[in-house]
Amino acid sequence: MRHELWVSMVSLFRSHLAALERSGKISSVKLDELFDNEIYINTDTEVLSIWLETISGKGSWSVITNKLDMTEPWFMSADGKVELSRESMDVPTAVEKLIEKLSTK
């Protein structure tokens, strides 16, 4: 089940990032899936990497921007609840919170 949730999460990332790019709040954004269950979101000066082990639900995210350089663990339950930065939320909210880690104009 987590694999399907991961696929949905990646789709939400694509949609949100495209909207931010169209609105001019972020530029030169590229989302790559170089490995299974891992994505890299790149802009000209920033990188956000998100990984999930779909069997256990454990993952991590890393961000490197002009203002931030950090890595944290995160967790997704089989029913789609996400624990991110000690908060519990649904997948769409987690996507928004992770995208907020990137600088926007």
Image (cartoon, rainbow, N blue to C red):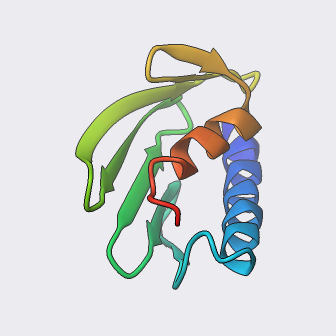
For residue 65, what is the image quadrant?
A: bottom left
Establish if 64 lies above or below 88. below
Q: Could you tell whether 34 is left or right of 23 in the image?
A: left
For residue 42, what is the image quadrant?
A: bottom left
Can residue 56 be seen here? The reply is no
Q: Nearer the viewer, residue 70 or 40?
A: 70
Q: Could you tell whether 2 is left or right of 100 in the image?
A: right
**The N terminus - image quarter:** top right
Establish if 88 lies above or below 98. above
Q: Nearer the viewer, residue 43 or 9?
A: 43
Q: Residue at x 73, y 74 (%)?
A: 23
Q: Residue at x 40, y 57 (%)?
A: 49
Residue 84 x, y percent position in the rendering: 50, 25
Residue 28 x, y percent position in the rendering: 52, 85
Residue 97 x, y percent position in the rendering: 58, 39
Q: Nearer the viewer, residue 21 or 89?
A: 21
Residue 24 x, y percent position in the rendering: 65, 77
Q: Could you tell whether 104 is left or right of 20 in the image?
A: left
Residue at the extreme front: 105
